[in-house]
Amino acid sequence: MWGGGPQGFLLGWRDIATAALGAFVLWLAMRYGGQASGVLVDLERLGLQVRSWTWLLLFLATALSWSVIASVGAWLLWHGLIRARAMGRDTEYLVTNRRVLIRRGRTELSLDRKGIVDVAVVEVSSGCRHVFLILDAPEARAL
């Protein structure tokens, strides 16, 4: 009877907040990297030789810390922007006279239309609508 997929920007406020947190963590990583390299250069001027084990271990600890901070920031940014939009584009809805099928990638949710008690429609920007299926079962309720 009907089939379709999500349209529009495909990002919610949680996705944007995750991406903003990722950008902030990446900014912190860049600031930390700049300050740490300044400290390492100052230690050389104060007499700690670059070829010493102490300087090498301090450099490796600083590099490891920077790489962890930068990778967490990059992962948050990717998760909030790229992954969220890809999952939205990968979602499909199919409504027949007997069943409702919601598929995202390899995950599927199939339910009998008799289990749908009501449908709530919320208007959003650009003429799109969010549709919420209110479900009922003998032992549970779900939205």
Image (cartoon, rainbow, N blue to C red):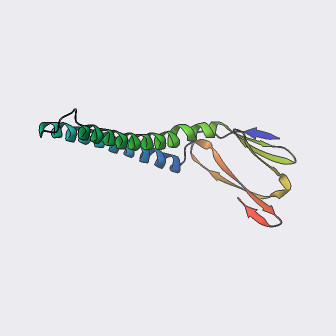
Quadrant of the rendered image containing residue 5: top right
What residue occupies the far top of the structure in this picture?
51
Task: Please give left or right for residue 61 compared with residue 50 in the image.
Answer: right
List x then y, in percent, for residue 96. 84, 44
Q: Residue at x 48, y 48 (%)?
A: 18
How many badges with numbers are in the image? 0
Task: Please give left or right for residue 60 compared with residue 40 in the image.
Answer: right
Q: Residue at x 22, y 36 (%)?
A: 52
Relative to 86, does residue 131 appear above or below in the rendering? below
List x then y, in percent, for residue 58. 27, 42
Relative to 128, does residue 142 appear above or below in the rendering? below
One can see residue 9 in this view: no
What residue occupies the far bottom of the structure in this picture?
139
Task: Please give left or right for residue 80 compared with residue 49 in the image.
Answer: right
List x then y, in percent, for residue 43. 17, 40
Q: Quadrant of the N terminus?
A: top right
Q: Residue at x 79, y 40 (%)?
A: 2
Relative to 134, does residue 48 appear above or below in the rendering? above
List x then y, in percent, for residue 143. 70, 58
